Image: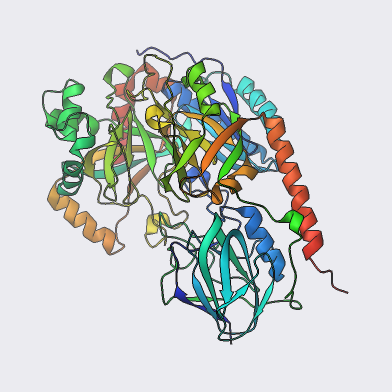
Amino acid sequence: MSVRTELPPARYEYGGDEFVFVELDQQMSIEANFKAMMITSALAERELEGIVDICPSNASYLIRVDPDVLSPRDLVAVLQELETGAGEVPDDYVLSTRIVDVPVLFGDPWTHEALMRFRDRHQDPDSTDLEYGARVNGFDSVQAFVDHLSGNPWLVTMLGFVPGLPFCYQLEPRERQVQVPKYVRPRTFTPERAFGIGGAFSVIYPVQGAGGYQLYGISPVPVLDVRQDHPDFAHSIVFPKVGDIWRYRSIDRAEYDETRDRVEKGEYRYRQRDVEFSPAAFLADPQAVNDSLLEVLYR
Amino acid sequence: MTGRIAVGSGGLSTTVQDLGRPGRYSIGMPPSGAMDQYSYRLGNLLVGNDEGAAALEATYIGPTLEFSDDRVVAVTGGDAAVTLNGDPVPTWEALAVSAGDVLAFGMISSGARPYVAVSGGVDVPEYLGSRSTYTLIGLGGLEGRKLADGDELPLGPARGPSTAGARVPDELVPRFGSDIEVRTVVGLCSYRLTETALDSFLSTPWRVTKDADRVGYRLRGGTLDFVEREQPFGAGSDPANVVDLGYPIGSVQVPGGDEPIVLLGDAVTGGGYATVGTVVSVDRDLFGQAKTGDTVRFRPVDVDEALAARAERNQQLQRARAALTREEA
């Protein structure tokens, strides 16, 4: 049984005249993330005129309004009411979501080349990002570190930075969470579909560009499809959704190449299954919930 | 036959922009849109378009454009020497052009971004409800990129009588200096800065660096200290880091304590740096006309003053509409 995180009172902040930012906690926890999901879902259900964007984030959320229609002051009153109504995440709360298999080639040549170009911006220029991450998190080997990252699934807790980038938080009790710092100075180049970690969060970079997360691998499958050519993007240009549960499965080069081939032919389909996720059940027995999630995914 | 513009020279960085593509921040997509919305809207009003018609936003060095049919054009925003077939023409004024006429730009003298509005609007395909270019991902506008020499831009059908000769009244033309003051609501994660650092943030004349584009403006000029703390779980070890969160457009973050970044229309929508305040919406336009080497001062205001600034801008736009929109007789 892991320890529950008590959330402090929420902090309401005006981001100029168009934004309201609400910090539920300064630290990350499953509890804070689920509270952000619950309040933002409740707000969406109200269908208030003048709401432009509702963005649940890791341990906070951000709302954009059209102040000519809805005053940010009135919005804060609504949010405070929702917060009171939501209370703590109730024991019988169940998230209807999906679990998705996301293949990752760890230690691949493309992210390796990228990270070697920016050693001068890294905490430890003499190690690779994987070697450094394994060491600072107390793993005996890179393989043991990769096994951990690709073992239990991750919760998609936020989308952002650029379109389609999922921030993911591993479904592990606090004492088993890995953490790594971001680069000392951000890279100016990251390959498309690179898998990386910063703080306690993993990401997949949707497009080539700047980035500050430690680079560990690359996925053969896209998270963003601007032209919506791929079948899994028929309804949205981005694949990830907040509340998704993703398992990063370690694959070899042969499977990477074969999967890339299917993606390029438009034949790839994500392996995904509908699941119910109970935060209370997870906090009571994380490994039992993880085992059952994985069992549903690969059944 | 539909009109078009032949792009002789694309200029330094010219893109198709409109009101923007709001409503997709939650998937990480910024709204894009004209950086200086006021100048952009007035351009459209001058040429008789809907205020949200797509126009061209140039940066420092404007494009060279040849028209294929009769149009009304107007140049607003950053002040540059503009010529039509080599002859100087006024800005903030509707100009009649005919097939074969060439509009060209000289050096910019104040501001950073001139806008070119054309009657009928630039008729590139809409992407998710907007024609604005978002170059980071390569979508919207003309093939998701800045204009290049030799491009052709389709134009929409012009409607209504010609507005040629219309002028923006002097009192509604903005003046762009090289020292801007932007009203800023301090907050978000400003508790991360020490009291001295927050005072310093608000009193420092920050200088716009060369890393200043549609995503954001990086500034230099001082060093700000963060309150010492044990970093919260998940944030990462740097004192400037927080658990990754959403960034309001106009928000200011201070990576490393010495390089404030103000996020603008093509903002990254979230990340792990402490944000310390947000520039009010109407003053984002001032960044659209700020150039490398200009100075920026942040003036603290509360949300009521931010809303009042917005109301004042709405009234100013209303006056511009009254002055430039010809009611059908």
User: Which image quadrant is residue A131 in?
Assistant: top left
In-front residue for pair B279/B329: B279
In-front residue for pair B250/A164: B250
Position above or below: B279 against B78: above
Residue A99 percent across, percent down from the top left: 36, 39
Q: Looking at the image, how many numbered discs can be counted on the residues?
A: 0
The N terminus of chain B lies in quadrant: bottom right
| Left or right of B6 in this view: B185 | right
In-front residue for pair A262/B116: B116
Residue B122 percent across, percent down from the top left: 57, 71
Q: Residue at x 67, y 75 (%)?
A: B95
- Residue A199 visible, this orientation: yes
What coloring was used for the rendering?
Answer: rainbow
Q: Residue at x 68, y 43 (%)?
A: A50
Q: Residue at x 37, y 43 (%)?
A: A273
| Left or right of A226 in this view: A83 | right
Position above or below: A173 against A126: above
Residue A267 percent across, percent down from the top left: 29, 61
The C terminus of chain B lies in quadrant: bottom right
Residue A132 percent across, percent down from the top left: 17, 29
- Residue A69 visible, this orientation: no
User: Which image quadrant is residue B180 in?
Assistant: top right
